[in-house]
Amino acid sequence: MIVVEVKDNEGLDRALKRFKKKVERVGVLKQARQRMAYTKPTVSRKAQKLKAMYKYRMLYGNNG
């Protein structure tokens, strides 16, 4: 759990900025997005294979 203590004479904007930096550094949002969009292992392998084929074609041309 991320905790940000507001110091004396510190504005809310400044505290919010520190909170956002802590969230980004820990990777909370990135992890949440990954959990929301689950892909099956077979689908991810197929996507990797298609990406590799695309890169190969771009590198060596369509004739292989």
Image (cartoon, rainbow, N blue to C red):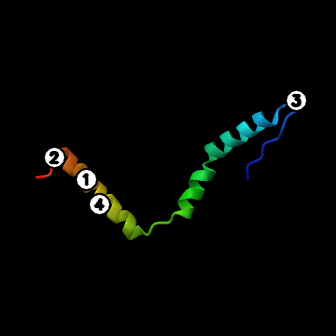
> What residue is disc 4 on?
49
Question: Which type of secondary structure does the marked residue at label 4 adopt?
Answer: helix
Q: Is residue 34 left or right of residue 52?
A: right
What crowding class fits label 1: few (fewer than 14 Cα within 10 Å), some (14-19), or many (20 or more)? few
Question: Which type of secondary structure does the marked residue at label 1 adopt?
Answer: helix
> What residue is disc 3 on?
9
> What residue is disc 1 on?
54
- Would you identify the image quadrant in which residue 4 lies? top right
Question: Which type of secondary structure does the marked residue at label 3 adopt?
Answer: loop
Q: Which numbered disc flags the more N-terminal residue, 2 or 1?
A: 1
Image position, residue 54 (x, y; %): 25, 53
Residue placed at 58% from the left, 55% from the top? 31
Q: Looking at the picture, does residue 40 appear above or below residue 10? A: below
Image position, residue 28 (x, y; %): 63, 52
Spatial CA span between label 4 and label 1: 9 Å
Q: Looking at the picture, does residue 50 appear above or below residue 11? A: below
Q: Amino acid at mark 4?
A: Lys
Residue that extends furthest to the left in the rendered view of this protein: 63
Closer to us: 44 or 16: 16
Q: Is residue 11 left or right of residue 17?
A: right
Spatial CA span between label 1 and label 3: 56 Å
What crowding class fits label 3: few (fewer than 14 Cα within 10 Å), some (14-19), or many (20 or more)? few
